[in-house]
Amino acid sequence: MSKQCLLALAYPELETLITGMGSPRFVAKQVWEWIYSKHVVDFDAMHTLKKGTREQLKATCCVLPSDVVERHAAGDKTAIKYVLKLQDGQLIEMVVLFEKTHTTLCISSQSGCPVDCKFCLTGVVGFKRQLTAHEITGQLLTAFAEGHPIQNVVFMGMGEPLMNYDNVFAAIDQINSPEYFGIGKRHVTVSTSGYIVGIKRLIADKRFINLAFSVGHANPEKRAKIMPIETRNPIFEVSRLLHQYLKMHNRKLTLEYTLLENTNEDSQAIAELIPLAKYLEAKINVINLNPHSKIPFSPVSEGVIKRIRAQIKDADVPVTIRFRRGQDIAAACGQLGESHLEKP
Ligand code: SAH
Ligand code: SF4
């Protein structure tokens, strides 16, 4: 029988478990603090608990729903990729990104991804299953327990977060809550490939979050060739809904644009992207492709990136260039999934 994962329990449930073991109620508070304030995941290190209680907990419970099975630090020290094994053996990946002023955690919302974008390694891996809310927050607790002072969380790892809406937002509620992880709302970003059902739910639920939309190509026909999600989730409808959503609150949208050589980097393609950004009052984050032997595209040259930046700037649209981090460890966004591929 698998052990009870404490991260899956709400406070009253933890209390029931602890008192059921014959310990007083306040022990639940102590355990909660060890986990959510001190980020300790090893019962042996919870030294305010009696030895007997620790042994009982060790025998029947675990804190995290996953174990770290691999750690890969990038040669340039900008990132560490972790491969985590869930209780059923599924593998997921998360990346800690060290930025100048803060540390960001890029987490997965699904094991694999059903969306099948042609430039994304997670798409190549295919869909395995949804992650539960505590498998999502477990990634954050793991990062803390590994000693990283995470300030920002981005849902840009494996999976399409809006296709796992209930679990993703249950996890975000805990990430934001001072009772749990206490990371402010403005420090959490969800990235979507444009899933209409999910965006409609955000609107209906009045769930206001930092959102990023992965464009791929602003031209519908060309987009459909690299992002099959376009067929049922046309970019025109996605944009109309995003516009409606953005009018409801004051958060900014980011358009993510992954550059693919001879596919979406020509000035005509950028000319089609600019009106979309203006309509949505969004900034454009340009990402050069992280190449991989399983992905049938190449990145563009530095010169092309400069030309694109100038074209966007000239149109008075804010633009940032995301530098590739941790490329040597397949740790950058869109490269997660390596651990699922057969080793040669
Ligand atoms: N499924 C969500 C979030 C995860 S992907 C989404 O698609 O938005 C996170 C980002 O990585 C997306 O903007 C995606 O377009 C980008 N991406 C995917 N594959 C990539 C690759 N090989 N190189 C660079 N960026 C990539
Ligand atoms: Fe899924 Fe995002 Fe990758 Fe597309 S880019 S396959 S939506 S993870």
Image (spheres, grey):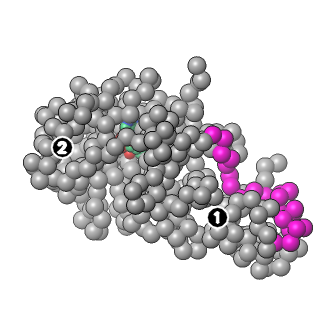
Quadrant of the rendered structure where residue 55 is?
bottom right
* Chain part drawn in magenta: 49-70
Distance in Å between CA atoms under marks 2 and 1? 41 Å
Q: Residue at x 67, y 61 (%)?
A: 7
Residue at the image position 62 percent from the left and 44 percent from the top: 84
Figure quadrant, ligand 1: top left
Picture coordinates of residue 82, whole percent (x, y): 58, 44
Image quadrant where residue 236 sits:
top left
Assign the C terminus to one quadrant of the image.
Answer: top right
**Secondary element at tag 1:** loop
Question: Mark 2 — residue?
Answer: 309
Total numbered badges shown on the rendered structure = 2
Q: Position of residue 308 (x, y in %)?
A: 17, 39
Label at residue 39: 1
In the depicted view, which residue is nearer to us: 238 or 216? Answer: 216
Name the amino acid, label 1: His
The amino acid sitting under disc 2 is Arg
Q: Does the magenta-highlighted stretch encompass residue 60?
A: yes
For the residue pair 13 and 252, the one nearer the viewer reads as 252
Q: In the rendered view, does 41 fall on the left or right side of 203?
A: right
